[in-house]
Amino acid sequence: MMSDIRACIFDLDGVVVDTAKYHYLAWKRLASELGFEFHIEDNERLKGISRLESLNILLEIGGLSLNIQEKERFAKLKNDWYLDYINKMKSDEILPGVKEFIEELKNDGIKIGLGSASKNAVFILNQLGIIHLFETIVDGNRVSKAKPDPEIFLLAAKDLKVEPSQSIVFEDAEAGVEAAIRGGFKCVGIGEQAILHKANVVLPNFKGMTMTKFLNMIN
Ligand code: BG6
Ligand code: MG
């Protein structure tokens, strides 16, 4: 699998940085403000998809319907709370092993891209001091179709001048794995096999990951 690989495209939230917990806390606070409970079991449905789509699912869970102005107001409120967490984030919240792994891939001449639904991606990468690792950044500000549509990853591959079949996508969300597979990419799921079973390979995390170990796992 790796011999013809020219690029690796990383999702951000839950793959490079531990922000998934902050998204969850901010949505939970919004649900409570709106008068209902939001449980961790339902959080998986919100991973990988856009802010507004996440809000729609949250409202469906709470049995509420709002007009677009109200939705925009609540999406902004959630994002303000989320940014309060993100502003305090330090580089120790980069997920273990991922930075070193990306550096090793780069040294080996593999192109590196970011493919994230988040509109806060550039801010987060700057905050963590790792923006220089990425040759291209495709985020929620650059696409009109959210995961599971492959648009994000296809744009990243185009920027990196590689074919999807020559690229590996790293994803922690079901919608993201689906997007990668639909786009013709190889996909490594980061998390649980039961959730990410459509990926070619699933790893629990990047702890202690090296190129050699990775090659052994995927070939
Ligand atoms: C994805 C997250 O990376 O970005 C989703 O997995 C989130 O949970 C989405 O809703 C949009 O992020 P943001 O930062 O633009 O609200
Ligand atoms: Mg993610």
Image (cartoon, rainbow, N blue to C red):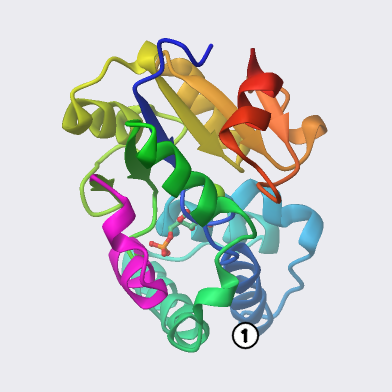
Q: Amino acid at mark 1?
A: Glu
Q: Tell me how many marks there are.
A: 1
Q: Which residue is mark 1?
A: 33
Q: Is residue 56 positioned above or below 19 on the image?
A: above
State the residue at coordinates (32%, 31%): 109
Give the quarter of the figure containing the C terminus: top right
State the residue at coordinates (62%, 85%): 33
Residue 98 percent location from the top left of the image? 56, 52
- The residue closer to the viewer here, 98 or 88, is 98
Image position of 111 (left or right of 216): left
State the residue at coordinates (23%, 45%): 135
Question: Does the magenta run of residues contain 130?
Answer: yes
Query: What span is in magenta?
Result: 121-135
User: Mark 1: which secondary structure?
Assistant: helix
Residue 152 percent location from the top left of the image? 32, 36
- The residue closer to the viewer here, 54 or 20, is 20
State the residue at coordinates (59%, 55%): 14
- The residue closer to the viewer here, 36 or 143, is 143
Residue 128: name its quadrant: bottom left
Image position of 9 (left or right of 209): left
Dominant secondary structure of the residues highlighted in magenta in the image: helix
Residue 143 percent location from the top left of the image? 24, 42
